[in-house]
Image (cartoon, rainbow, N blue to C red):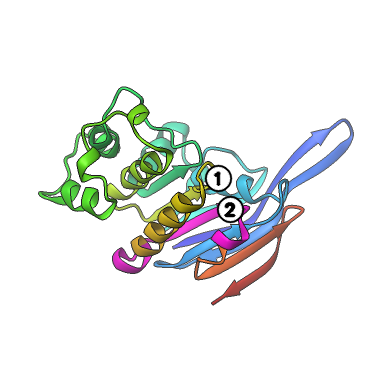
Amino acid sequence: MLQVKNLSKIYRVGNEKIYALDKVNLTVNKGEFVAVMGSSGSGKSTLLHMIAGVDTPDAGEVVIGDVDIHRLSASEQAIFRRRNIGVIYQSYNLVPTLTVEENMILPLALEGKKAADGEVERLLEFLNLTQFRKLLPNQLSGGQQQRTAIGRAMLTKPRLLLADEPTGNLDIQNTKEVVKLLKQANEMYGQTILMVTHDLAVGKEAKRQIVMKDGCIVGDTVK
């Protein structure tokens, strides 16, 4: 479903080359829940950004389905990402003037589409957000905002759900709730998830753990 092939990203500081990614190879199959872990500077966030198509590699390929996303034009990438990839950010990235429900349906609205009958209601209930559907982001707790972001990412039923430090701004209780929701999305809906986290306890909740160091994958464990 996802294939990363010999992916490299190099930064130059004077005459020195810094490898943020060094010929990384990774395959994620449909229905997997994968955590990518490592210390700051290990390359985990750079890898996620390359997979999301928001950063450009110096070499290598990112193939989702049968599409090498870095061979697409910028506009083609944006369309492909909107149709095939859901992204959950640490900082939520909700539109402040839109309600919970409006934020969730935004990707579909940008495509000129509507959710199937009852789909929004079912997802709001799954995320425990039904009673908050008409509230704005600034009227929500951090956990509620992140659950809204999860709903926005899930509603389009993406091939791949990318979570970038999804619990980084949350307290212990909300962290547990968000991780539980991601696990349920994977187990109940078969959602393929790739999650970047620096939190070892959060990473261990995934079915597969990838460990990165110095731009390379140094560990790959399946429960």
* Farthest bottom residue in view: 223
Residue in front for this viewpoint, 180 or 42: 180
| Residue 199: in magenta span | yes
Q: Earlier in the sequence, mark 1 or mark 2?
A: 1
Q: Type of residue at label 2?
A: Thr
Q: Is residue 117 above or below residue 104?
A: below
Q: Which mark is residue 197?
A: 2
> Residue 189: horizontal and vertical position, in percent?
29, 64
| 117 relative position to 55: left or right | left
Q: Farthest residue toward the top?
A: 97
Q: Position of residue 13 (x, y in %)?
A: 84, 33
The magenta stretch spans residue 32:
no
Where residue 192 sits in the image (x, y, percent)? 41, 61
In the rendered image, which quarter contains the N terminus? bottom left
- Give how far apart the Cα atoms at labels 1 and 2 are: 8 Å
Q: Which residues are magenta?
A: 186-202
Q: Secondary structure at mark 2?
A: strand
* Horizontal arrangement in the rendering, residue 151 relative to residue 176 (left or right): left
Quarter occupied by residue 179: bottom left
Judging by the rendered image, the residue that carries numbered circle 1 is 168
Please report the residue visible at 54 percent of the width from the left and 77 percent of the height from the top: 223
SS type, badge 1: loop
